């Protein structure tokens, strides 16, 4: 048997931490990339050509494109996210008010 068998105790604890850290950064990177792409499509202030340009820039040079997008349009990105959350909350509140104000279609069972 000339092949080396890698056992769990052959992988040092610092290696586990480093691998976990890199995996965490990789997942965070993809989350940021998807948030930027979603924000590009959410922004009503950009024209279609500007959206296409940002998408191409973000996909061709992802690290540089995302960093430049966040630096250039990060404040507006946060405002659009807050506006979307407020609109969702208002829609949910309106639904709850409408549902609570309507007459129930079923009768409740009497308590014993």
Image (cartoon, helix red, strand yellow):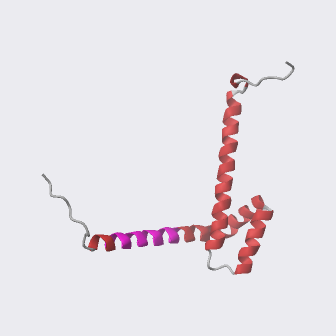
Which residue sits furthest top? 1
Q: Examine the image and state in which quarter residue 66 appears.
A: bottom right
Residue 30 magenta: no
Q: Residue 8 in the image: state x and y as whole percent.
A: 69, 25
Residue 69 picture location, percent across and down? 70, 67
Q: Is residue 50 left or right of residue 93?
A: right
- Quadrant location of residue 73? bottom right
Against 87, is 12 above or below? above
Find the magenta span and give its range. Answer: 82-97
Residue at 68%, 33% (x, y): give it: 16
Q: Is residue 25 left or right of residue 81?
A: right
Query: Residue 51 versus residue 6: which sits nearer the camera?
Result: 6
Is 85 in front, or is 69?
85
In what quadrant of the picture does the N terminus appear?
top right
Residue at 25% across, 69% down: 104
Q: Main secondary structure of the magenta part?
A: helix
Locate residue 66 relative to residue 99 in the image: left or right.
right
In this picture, is 45 found above or below 5? Answer: below
């Amino acid at each position: 048997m000339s092949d080396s068998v890698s056992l769990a105790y052959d992988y040092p604890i610092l290696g586990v931490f480093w691998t976990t850290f890199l995996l965490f950064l990789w997942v965070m990177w993809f989350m940021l990339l998807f948030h930027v792409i979603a924000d590009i499509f959410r922004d009503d202030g950009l024209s279609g050509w500007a959206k296409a340009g940002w998408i191409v820039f973000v996909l061709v040079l992802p690290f540089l494109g995302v960093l430049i997008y966040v630096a250039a349009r990060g404040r507006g990105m946060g405002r659009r996210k807050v506006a979307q959350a407020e609109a969702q909350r208002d829609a949910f509140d309106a639904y709850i008010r409408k549902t609570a104000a309507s007459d129930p279609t079923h009768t409740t069972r009497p308590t014993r």
